[in-house]
Image: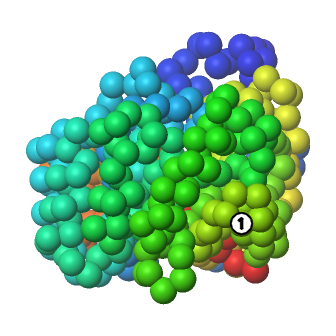
Amino acid sequence: MKSLKAQLHTLSNSEEELMILEKRHPGGPESNFQSHLKKIGLFPLRPTTLEVFQINLGKMCNQVCKHCHVDAGPDRKEIMERHTMDLCLQVIQREESMNCVDLTGGAPELNPNFRWFVSEIRAIRPELKIIVRCNLTIILANPRFNDLPGFFAKNRIEVVSSLPYFSAMKTDSQRGEGVFEKSIQALKLLNQVGYGRRGTGLVLNLVYNPSGAFLPGLQSELEAEFKTKLWDRFGVEFNSLFTITNLPISRFLEYLLRSENYEFYMEKLLSSFNPLAAAEVMCRNTVSVGWDGYLYDCDFNQMLDLKVDAAKSTHLSDWDAQSLSDRSIVVYNHCFGCTAGAGSSCGGATSK
């Protein structure tokens, strides 16, 4: 039988990752994610009300981060086209329960229609929360992006940005040489237009991902430490810190295999399964849209090419709210990452 490392070179990316993720744990078949949901009465996992519409505007990025589950980078050509954005706008206008549009990538700002799209969303639904997952360095990557802080502020965008640590060594080791210094510069520019400052209403949240095969610490404690260190050292302010568990897919899965930490990490996720976090997983109130318009339960499933299990609605072009509401959410063993410890979502920990 081939080793896990050898298997990475025999199948397409999504196939090989699913094969590895479904490898049985020492506990046998009952240790898989579906079995855990059955024990707490949550299988099949069903959606609640659609609140979050997460849209991947493309996989192109100016960075190549080691933990990136999108496998994004400068060489990626997948980009959402305007006609697909038009389909997104139709859904946003129609689905009244939706209260948040979450724009992600890659670097979503690299999509040539990014600003038009944001402005259209704001015009159609002025009350909506619009999140942009900005990697910070994009603001300094090219003069044409230097005015992004002002554009974000004008459109009342909530900015969510990854910052692995409050020091250069840990940040650069995960996200690339020089990224920390540029990130601090970008944070200061965001602060200058009011982001992260009390009373402005301009929300700036940071994201912490562990740099190795371990779970994040307590979110409230890490937030307090980040706020103190970033203010004392750099005069930087922000609103909240989100702790997100690295899921064993894409580049992080490759790291786990190379470092021979895969089994250890999966057993850690399994043993830390939290029923309260399982009930609050983000896929229950979210639909994720790929750059090509296909629909997924979350952006992690999107990267594994696990489309929604809705017979009448797998693409924006055949959007059917009832079919999506009646679906069963597709789960695999990578889902243990969202239910371990305090839980993990795109908005941070889900339980105490």
- Image quadrant assignment for residue 122: bottom left
Residue 278 point in image, percent of width and height: 65, 70
The C terminus lies in quadrant: bottom right
Residue 285 position, x and y percent, is 43, 72
Which residue is more in the foreground, 71 or 167?
Answer: 167
The residue that disc 1 covers is: 231
Q: Please tell me in which quadrant of the rendered image residue 174 appears.
A: top right
Which residue is located at x 74 percent, y 18 percent?
Answer: 5
**Image quadrant containing the N terminus:** top right
Whole-percent x and y of residue 325? 33, 72
Q: Is residue 243 visible?
A: no
Residue at (29% x, 35% y) in the render? 79
Describe residue 326's horizontal placement relative to residue 94 as left or right. right
The front one of 112 and 95 is: 112
Q: Residue at x 53, y 32 (%)?
A: 63
Pointer 1 local density, CA inside 10 Å: few below 14, some 14–19, many at least 20: few
- Up-down: is 341 above or below 169? below
Q: Quadrant of residue 338?
A: bottom right
Residue 54's x, y, as percent? 38, 59
Task: Identify the secondary structure beneath mark 1.
Answer: helix
**Residue drawn at point x = 71 percent, y = 14 percent:** 6
- Does residue 57 appear anywhere in the picture? yes
Q: Is residue 123 above or below residue 159?
A: below
**What is the count of numbered marks?**
1
Foreground of the two, 50 or 40? 50
Q: What is the three-letter code of the residue carrying label 1?
A: Trp
In front here: 348 or 226?
A: 226
